[in-house]
Image (cartoon, rainbow, N blue to C red):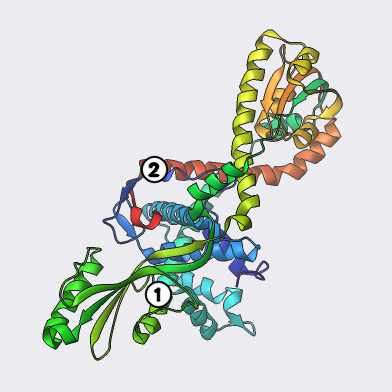
């Protein structure tokens, strides 16, 4: 649905909804929030509950966006849920700020915005049929969707005010350009740690420990209870049905007794043949997050169907083996590099000669002749925030941990960029740097709101 909307105004809306986690920032760990199963919504922010529908709408948006890019979302459910929780909480925090400032969007603004969304148009005019079809597909009523949209527009108003008072100084641009374009001379030692190779036993053990992460065929775990009309009689059976229904609704256990038994509790997958009554089989596809309990009957029995949770069949080891090997390598190599980084740091304290360090750590020694700091950054994966270490002459070697390995750099000479080239780069980078700084400051603002807020998350959803 979202594949070919890149040029539409709708895409702008989708991106706005799903990008509260700005580039270069991370979501505050969920563990810092209070976790509770006593709320009905996905979360409670400063006493205001966020409905589950808003959470599942976010899940749908994120999932569709990822799948449109060819990403397999099956093993990413936990991350998608975490992102969706983050989005709704941050959106609610910003909306509450907009309310305090008295700049919430009006119903008229929402109406005008809806009329202007290209995906809802037919022959250039708003199509109510297209709009209602879209809402049916995502399981939302018009009033609820328009309330979500009103929140989004209100948050835009708030962020627009922050944008007006924001600027990037000439000194900031000048500093960044100087760091990027200054040419340096000296020598560089690259130490690459040996790559870890996992054994077959490690792969099998890793698969067993993390089997839930390798989801394949999706299904749902359900329980079916049978209440016998034949054994209990019509009146007593109806009484027991009410009792069992109430227990299931409150997630309580149901005791098996005369006329009441658990007929089935297993994962159910599509196109699977089940030894269950036909009416139960017909009803199974209808139960889920939005309908957790269903009641059907035949001449002899009542059947209560309880949806428990979504499940998936794990993919066989052979299908995910390459992915597991890659994951083990990534984890182990990261630890190996971290340990090597500490050893090199210690060695540099007493040994400044890069040739001797190269022999000690079996590294590659290279001469740096007039390369820009930015070129070295791209070539060796040096983080942007570390570039300033390359543009000032140090008395002792600089040790950096990068994507390519451990770098030990001796800077002997720094030549500032030519004025013309510097100005060209400044003009090119100004809008990019401005946008980057703005996003960083907004995220800092959101982080502050999170820290000061009372936030409770429905722990049942994230289990």
- Give the x, y percent position of residue 3: 65, 69
Question: Label 1's element?
Answer: helix
The residue at the far top in this view is 350
Q: Is residue 106 visible?
A: no
Dot 1 corresponds to which residue?
A: 143
**Horizontal relation, residue 229 to residue 78: left or right:** left
Q: Are marks 2 and 1 in contact (CB under 8 Å)?
A: no
**Horizontal relation, residue 350 to residue 438: left or right:** right
**Horizontal relation, residue 182 to residue 163: left or right:** right
- Give the x, y percent position of residue 106: 43, 67
Q: Is residue 161 above or below residue 368?
A: below
Numbered label attached to residue 199:
none
Q: Nearer the viewer, residue 258 or 381?
A: 258
Q: What is the quadrant of the N terminus in the image?
A: bottom right
Dot 2 corresponds to which residue?
A: 31
Task: Give the spatial CA distance, label 2 vs label 1.
Answer: 34 Å
Q: Is residue 349 above or below residue 209?
A: above
Identified at 66% across, 35% down, the residue is: 196
Identified at 19% across, 69% down, the residue is: 256
Q: Nearer the viewer, residue 154 or 16?
A: 16
Identified at 79% across, 39% down, the residue is: 425
Task: Compare marks 2 and 1 and give the one earlier in the sequence.
Answer: 2
- Give the x, y percent position of residue 221: 39, 67
Q: What is the quadrant of the C terminus in the image?
A: bottom left
Q: Is residue 223 above or below residue 357?
A: below
Mark 2 vs mark 1: in front: 2
Residue 415 lies in what quarter of the image? Answer: top right
């Amino acid at each position: 649905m979202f594949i070919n909307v890149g040029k539409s105004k709708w895409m702008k809306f989708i991106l706005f909804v799903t990008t509260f986690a700005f580039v270069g920032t991370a979501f505050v760990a969920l563990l810092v929030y209070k976790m509770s199963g006593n709320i009905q919504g996905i979360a409670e922010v400063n006493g205001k509950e966020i409905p589950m529908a808003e959470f599942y709408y976010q899940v749908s948006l994120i999932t569709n966006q990822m799948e449109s890019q060819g990403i397999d979302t099956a093993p990413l459910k936990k991350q998608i849920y975490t992102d969706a929780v983050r989005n709704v909480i941050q959106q609610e925090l910003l909306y509450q700020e907009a309310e305090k400032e008295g700049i919430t969007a009006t119903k008229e603004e929402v109406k005008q915005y809806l009329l202007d969304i290209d995906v809802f148009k037919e022959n250039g005019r708003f199509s109510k049929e297209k709009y209602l079809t879209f809402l049916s597909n995502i399981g939302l009523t018009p009033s609820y969707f328009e309330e979500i949209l009103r929140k989004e527009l209100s948050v835009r108003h708030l962020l627009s005010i922050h944008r007006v008072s924001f600027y990037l100084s000439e000194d900031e641009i000048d500093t960044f350009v100087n760091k990027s374009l200054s040419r340096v001379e000296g020598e560089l030692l690259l130490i690459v740690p040996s790559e870890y190779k996992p054994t077959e036993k490690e792969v099998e053990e890793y698969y067993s420990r993390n089997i839930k992460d390798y989801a394949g065929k999706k299904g749902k775990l359900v329980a079916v209870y049978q209440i016998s009309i034949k054994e209990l009689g019509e009146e007593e059976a109806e009484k027991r049905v009410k009792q069992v229904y109430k227990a299931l609704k409150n997630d309580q256990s149901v005791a098996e007794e005369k006329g009441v038994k658990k007929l089935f509790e297993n994962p159910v997958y599509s196109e699977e043949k089940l030894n269950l009554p036909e009416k139960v089989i017909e009803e199974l596809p209808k139960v889920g997050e939005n309908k957790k309990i269903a009641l059907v009957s035949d001449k002899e029995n009542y059947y209560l169907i309880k949806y428990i949770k979504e499940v998936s069949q794990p993919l066989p080891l052979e299908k995910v083996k390459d992915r597991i090997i890659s994951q083990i390598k990534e984890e182990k190599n990261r630890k190996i590099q971290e340990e090597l980084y500490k050893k090199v740091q210690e060695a540099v304290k007493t040994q400044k000669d890069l040739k001797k360090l190269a022999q000690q750590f079996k590294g590659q020694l290279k001469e740096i002749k007039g390369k820009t700091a930015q070129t070295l950054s791209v070539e060796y994966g040096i983080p942007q925030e570390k570039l300033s270490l390359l543009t000032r002459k140090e008395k002792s070697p600089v040790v950096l941990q990068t994507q390519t390995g451990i770098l030990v750099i001796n800077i002997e000479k720094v030549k500032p960029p030519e004025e013309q080239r510097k100005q060209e780069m400044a003009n090119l980078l100004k809008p990019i740097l401005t946008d980057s700084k703005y996003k960083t400051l907004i995220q800092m603002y959101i982080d502050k709101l999170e820290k000061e807020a009372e936030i409770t998350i429905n722990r049942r959803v994230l289990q």
